[in-house]
Amino acid sequence: MVQVTTDIPVVPPAQRGYWSGVLSRLKRDPVAMICAVILAALVLSAVFAPWLGLADPYQGSMIARLAAPGTPGHLLGTDEQGRDMLSRLIYGGRLTLFIGLMPVVLAFFIGGTLGIIAGYVGGITNTIIMRVVDVFFAFPSVLLAIAISGALGAGVLNSLVSLTIVFIPPVTRVAEAVTSGVRSLDYIDAARASGANALTVIRVHVIGNVLSPIFVYATSLTSVCMILAAGLSFLGIGVRPPEPEWGLMLNTLRSAIYVNPWLAALPGVMIFATSLCLNLLSDGLRSAMNVRD
Amino acid sequence: MSATDKPLLSVRELKKHFPIKGGILGRTQAMVQAVDGVSFDVRAGETLGIVGESGCGKSTTAKLLIGLVDRDEGDIDLDGKSLGRDISLRALRRDIQMVFQDSYASLNPRMTILDSIAFGARVQGLDDPVGRARRLMARVGLDPDRFAGRYPHELSGGQRQRINIARALVMSPKVVVLDEAVSALDKSVEAQVLNLLSDLRAEFGLTYIFISHDLNVVRYISDRILVMYLGEVVELAPVDMIWAEQAHPYTRSLFSAMPSMDPDNRTQKPPLTGDPPNPIDPPPGCRFHTRCAFAADVCKTRHPALGPMVAGSPHWVACHLHDPASGHPRAGQGVPA
Amino acid sequence: MLSYFLRRLILVLPVAFGVSVVCFALVQIAPGDPLTAIMPVDATAEQQAAMRAAYGLDKPVPVQYLIWIGNLLQGEMGRSIASGRPVADEVFGAVGNSLLLAAAAAVIAFPIGTFLGFLAGYYRDTLLDRAVTALSITGVSVPNYWLGIVLVIIFSVNLGWLPSMGAGPGGSQDWHWDWAHMRHLVLPAVTLAVVPIGIVARTVRALAGDILSMDFVTALYAKGLSRGDVLRHVARNAAATALSVMGLQLGYLLGGSILIETVFNWPGSGFLLSNAIFQRDLPLLQGTILVLAMFFVGMNLIVDVAQAAIDPRVKRS
C-alpha cells in the first residue's frame, strides 16, 4: 500500500471493437469478475443502506457493548458503545468508499488535464508544471497525506483535499509522459498543419488517444487511496466520530482487543477486502486491455 | 528563378538551429544547425525535388514551410504575401499542406478515415466537409461507400497514403509538401501513388515540394532538383541539367551511389565514405570539404555562395570549383571527371 | 561520475527548496491562529501584538519564510509548543527510532522479497509463481495498520509471546541490543515489512523473467560473449534496478512507518507526528515532516548515484 509508482501503462492503439473485446475478456476472468461483484455489492449496500432494514448505526446501548458476533439481534456483534456492527460496517462503506475513491477521480481529471497540457504544450509550461510535481514526489505519499490532513485538521472535506493533492502528481506524471509520446506522432502534426488550434487538436486528436493509459493507471491507484483514506481516519485526522467509517471504527475498537479481539479486527477486514478487490480488478483490466508495462 | 516568372512560394535565408541542452546546469551547450540559410523559389505548377542524405535538413525544411517547426530567421512568402506579416500561419496552412512518410502514424488510429480527411475542412470552416472528403476519397481511388467508416489499421499502406493525400487536398491547397511520401511503400504501390500524384497535380493545378532520398523517384516527378548538405543548399537545377552534369562534388557522389539499371554502367568509383560531419559543429568554409576529393585550402576557410554556374544559367551551385575568382587551384574548371 | 553526482545534486536543490516551501505552507494552511495554543486566554491586545511580533508573525508571509529558512539553515527549527524543547532535539531522537524500525523491516523484507521473486520468475507460470504473485498482491493490498492489530491479537493477546507496545520494557526510550528490547521490535518490523516484500518480490520476478527470457541471453551469446560474461552482464542490469527499488523502499518505509508506529506506540517520528497533530503543535509538525521529506530526497539522490555507478547506461540518459 501507501506507495505510488509511475510505471507508464502502454495501451495498444484502440481499434474497432476494442472495448467490446476488453469487456468480453474481462468477463472471462473469474478473479476480476468476483472482485467486481464484491465491489458492486459493497457500493450498492452502502448506497441503499437506509432501505435494508438495518439497525440504527448511531444508536448505542450501554448494556449491549462489545457483544460477540452471532449475538441474537446483532449478527456481527456490537461495538464499544453497543452499536450494531453489521449496520455500522454497511453504513461505514458510504464515507469510506467515498473518501477512498473520490480523490482518485478528482486527481484523474485535474492531474490528467495538467499532464496533457504539460505534455502537449511542452517548453516552459511543461517545466513549471513538472517541477512542481517533482516537489510533491519528494514526499512519500503517506507522509504527504498525513502532513496536509494533520495541518488542515480532521473532516471529510479536508481528507478529500489532502488525498487529492497526494494523487494529482503521479497522475500528472503519467499523463505528461503519455501525451508527449502521442504529441510526437505525425497525425498530431498533420492536425496542426490543417490550421487547427491547440485546444481543437487536444480535444479531437489527443484526449481519445491518451485517456485509456491514464485511466488504467488511475485504477491502479484506487487501492492505495482506499487504504490511505481509512488510515487517516484510523489516525483520527479523517472522518470525525460518531460517523461510521471503517478506519475510524478500527481505531475506536482497538481498546477492545483484549475483550473481543476478532470483533476489533472486523472493520480492517472490510478495508482489506475492498483494497484487494480494487487491486485485482485493476490488474484484470490491465490484462484485458493487453497493457504492457 | 528566371525574373519573368513570379514565384508562387519564395523562401529566403531560412534558419533553424535546435539547442542541445546538457551539462551540470542543463544550459544550452550547442546548437544543431538543422537548416542554415536555405533560399529557393517555387513557381506555380512546378515540382521541386529536394534530395540529400538523412540529417541534411530536408524534413526540417518541410516542417518550417508549414510552421510545424518555428523558424529562427528567414522569410516565407506565398503569392507575394509574407508569412507573419501579410498572412497568418492559419491562413498559410490552408494553402500549403503536407503528406508524411509514415502512412500509419500520420492518421489518428481512433478516427474513421472520413473524419480524418474532413477534419481540416471543418477546422477551416469550409462548406460541406463530408462531401469534400467523400469526393476526394473517390478521386484517390477509395470508394467512399466502402471505406468511409473504416479505421487506419484496416487499410493497406498504399491505401493509407492515398487517404493522407486526400486529407492534404481537402482544403484545396496551392502547395503540397510531400515528405518522403512514397518512400515506405512497396515499389509497385509506389509507382501507382506517384502516377496518382502526377494526375492530381495536373487536375488541381498543384505545386509540389517533393522530398525524397530516392533519386529515381525524384527524377520522375520533379521539374527541378535542390540538393541539400548539412542544412545548406549546395546545388539547384532543372532535372535534365543536373542529370547531365552534377556540378557539385557532393551531388556527383550522391548520384554515383545510386544503383544503376545498366549492368555495364556499374559504380566504378567508391561513392561517399564516412558519415556526414556533426551538424552541431559544422566544418568552417565549405561544409563538404572534409569529404570532398577536390578540397583545397580555400575550401577550408571560405564559404562558397550559391549562384548560377554561368551568368543567367538556371543551374546553380555553391562550390569554389565553379567560381573563377575563388582562389581554388582548379577554379572555373568545374568538377574533374 | 563526479560530474554526474554534481549534476544530480544541483537538480536536487530546487526540489529541496520546493519541499521547504510546502512544509512552510503547512502552517499557513492550518486553520486558526498558530499562537492560540500558547497565548494566555486573558491576553490583552497589546500582549497579543507583542507576542505576534516576537514570533515574527506580524511580517509579510514571504519575509516569514525567509526568516524561517534562515533559521533552518543554522540548524534552528524552533521550539515545540507542547514540550518547549527544541524541535530539532525531539525530531532527531525520534527519527533515530524510526530508522531502526525501517532498517529492521528492510532486513526482513529484502531477502524474503528477493527470494520469493526469484522463485516466481524462475518457475514462471507454475503453481509456485501464481502463489507468489497472489502473495505479493495480498501484501500490497493489506492495510498494514490493520495487519499490525491482527498480529497483536495473535502474538500478544492470544499467545502472549511478544509485547504489543513501546520500544523497550517499561516504556524505555533508550535502545539496547538485548532481547528485552529486540522483542519489542519484532511485531512492528514484521508488519512494516509486508508491503515491501510484495513490491520487491514483484520487481525481482519481472527482472528474473527478463533475464531468463531467451532472446536477451541468446543475443549476448550471439555476440560471442562467454557464459561468465553473460551472467555478469545480466547481474549488473538486474542489480542496478533491484538496488534502486530497494533504496526507494527504505525511504518509503521511513515515511510509511507513521501508521505502524501509532499502532505499536513505537517512539519514532510517526508517533511524534501524530502527537504533534493532536496537540496542534505546528512547529513540531513542520519540523518532523521537513526532516522526513529531506531524508527521502537524500535517499533518492543516493539511489540515483549508486544506480549510475553500477549501470553506466543510467548516466547517459
Image (cartoon, rainbow, N blue to C red):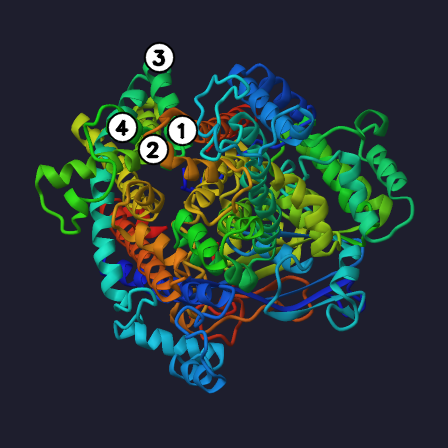
Task: Say which label, 2 or 3, has the lower sequence index.
Answer: 3
Q: Residue at x 41, y 47 (%)?
A: A142
Task: Say which label, 2 or 4, has the lower sequence index.
Answer: 2
- Residues at marks 3 and 1, common chain? no
Q: Position of residue B132 (x, y in %)?
A: 88, 41
Residues marked 3 and 4 touching at CB (< 8 Å): no
Label 1 marks which chain's residue?
A
Q: What is the C-alpha distance between the residues marked 2 and 4?
A: 10 Å
Label 3 marks which chain's residue?
C
Q: What is the C-alpha distance between the residues marked 2 and 3?
A: 31 Å
Corner quadrant of residue A213: top right
Q: Name the residue tied to disc 1.
A: A265
Label 4 marks which chain's residue?
C
- Front in this rendered view, residue B46 or C183: C183
Q: Which residue is drawn at 69% across and 42% down?
A: B220
Q: What is the C-alpha distance between the residues marked 1 and 4?
A: 13 Å
Q: Nearer the viewer, mark 2 or mark 3?
A: 2
- Residues at marks 1 and 4, common chain? no
Specify the amino acid type for callout 3: Leu
Q: Which of marks 1 and 4 is in front?
A: 4
Specify the amino acid type for callout 2: Ile
Q: Nearer the viewer, mark 3 or mark 1?
A: 1
- Front in this rendered view, residue C165 or B330: C165
- Front in this rendered view, residue A293 or C264: C264
Tell me the quadrant of the picture where the N terminus of chain A can be found: top left
Label disc, if present, on residue C149 of the rendered structure? 2
Q: In this view, does C208 lie to the left or right of B82?
A: left
